[in-house]
Image: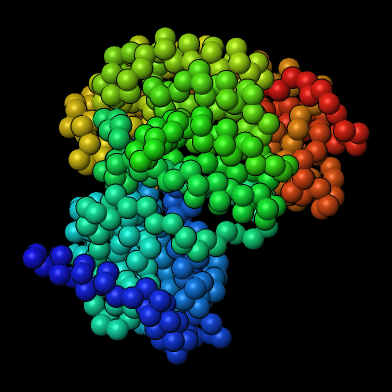
Amino acid sequence: MSLKKQTEHAIFSQNRGDCINAVAQIMEMRATGAAPLAYVTTYGCQQNVADSEKIKGQLEEMGFSFTQDPDLADLILYNTCAIRENAESKVFGKIGELKHKKSKKPSLITAMCGCMAEQDHVVERVKKSYPYLDLVFGTHIIHYLPQLLFTFLTNGKRIFENGSEDEDKQIIEDLPIKRDSGQVGAWLTIMYGCNHFCSYCIVPYVRGRERSREPEAIEQEFRQLVEAGYKEITLLGQNVNAYGKTLKNPITFSDLLRRLDRVEGDYRIRFMSPHPKDATPELFETMAQSEHIAHSLHLPLQAGNNRVLKAMRRNYTREQFLELVEQARAHMPDITFTTDLIVGFPGETYEEFLETVDMLQKVKFNSLFTFIYSPRAGTKAAVMEDHVPAQEKSRWFQELWKEQEAIVAQTSPAMVGTVQRVLVQGYNDKKTMLMGKTEGNMNCEFIGDDSLIGTFVHVKITESPNFALKGTVLNEPINDITGGY
Ligand code: 5AD
Ligand code: SF4
């Protein structure tokens, strides 16, 4: 047995309940305030947000309360993202700040988890250069948090763990989830991992292969959310269209959607993200016929040129992508699209980049999530030749946005006069108006009082500067909802 296996065994074989109780007792004695306080920060995507809710749920079981002030905390934990270099740099900056905090409060427990903790080069760097980071654990073993904390608290040695291959395949149900209070929407993970290995992407390396949760478990959690009053439930997975393939009794993502849609209640379903390669007419039909699924799709395009798409290993062409958009619009004329785009993939030429710009005109996305390519160690693209200087890529990036802004200026006036069904989420940043989201996932602001928060209202759009919609709430129920970009 290797040393790693022995350590794993020692940590992971401890009884979970015993560890929870023991950590609670130890922390009660060590806490600087009335209850031990945890400060948890999440970087990256919604999958990480959902993981942090499970981490917080477990911390709560161990007696922790939560603080927004790291200086008051007895435990600081960063749940990290590895998708691009700047996401990692941000985290390293934050970890660096822990040195000072730990010297001021030696009893402070410092921890890092998430996608960065799954990468060997990150772990090596932490071991060498950040000796004040106590606990580093990967994405597959967040359910061992009580055992990890107990082990650290009792032997005081730094812990670096990312589990064994078996853990990578497991799905752990019934972890406590602490959702932030006052939320109108909730995240629901339906599957983990990704099998695609797009050449630029680190996700399959840090989150493992596709695993789907059983539909019964998903439906149970879904029903609890509806009963608890959540109005927008977003189903999460790296590639939701592949849902169900790994189940003992395989079902499709559309089967799951239809099953959830049958749950009675006043709520809306969203999901992210479907891979265009696996999007099917069945999915669009299901969305169109459903009672609760919002008519909006986040469909990551990544690039508009076929050679680049092939080098990215995306498995679709620009023509196929456009066909999908057309099919979806044929089923749902009011559907809206958002997308992810990468600028400056290795070897991409300016002419090839212009084909991405051209796709904006062709599809007319509602909004974009745009990224400059960032090499990730271990991926296929990281070793491809990259001849375009960073400055040039930034210029392309700005050009992309200029085009998008021009498209929005062309299309957004059509929103004025339409009536939108809006889920009221709270106040805008300035606290002057209420804000919510349309079916098409656009922000919309209007005057109204607190009682509307968490309800669906109909808003007549009066202004649409740059897609930041403004309107007035209609008091009468409306049967015909018009327009909707
Ligand atoms: N560089 C830049 N962007 C990336 N993305 C994934 N990997 C990289 C990378 N190496 C983007 C993709 C993906 C989104 C979540 O992040 O657009 O859809
Ligand atoms: Fe970041 Fe991707 Fe991990 Fe999400 S899955 S946290 S985006 S690296």
Q: Quick check: 446 above or below 27? A: above
| Front one among 403 and 236 | 236
Q: Quick check: 453 above or below 400? A: below
Q: Quick check: 459 above or below 73? A: above
Question: Which quarter of the picture shows residue 244?
Answer: top left
Q: Quick check: 429 above or below 161? A: above
| Front one among 7 and 135 | 7
Question: How many callouts does the rendering have?
Answer: 0
Residue 312 in the figure: left or right of residue 453: left
Query: Which residue is painted at 66% across and 34% down in the image?
Result: 292
Residue 43 in the figure: left or right of residue 381: right
Question: Which quarter of the picture shows residue 482?
Answer: top right
Q: How is the image coloured?
A: rainbow
Residue 236 in the figure: left or right of residue 229: left
Quarter of the figure that contains the C terminus: top right
Quarter of the figure that contains the N terminus: bottom left
Residue 229 in the figure: left or right of residue 357: right
**Residue 285, percent from left and from top:** 57, 20
Query: Which residue is painted at 24% across and 77% down in the image?
Result: 157
Say whether residue 435 is visible: no
**Residue 308, percent from left and from top:** 30, 18
Query: Which residue is painted at 87% across and 33% down in the image?
Result: 477
**Residue 447, percent from left and from top:** 84, 42
Query: Which residue is painted at 19% across and 59% down in the image?
Result: 124
| Front one among 208 and 386 | 208
Q: Residue furthest bottom?
A: 29
| Front one among 15 and 180 | 15
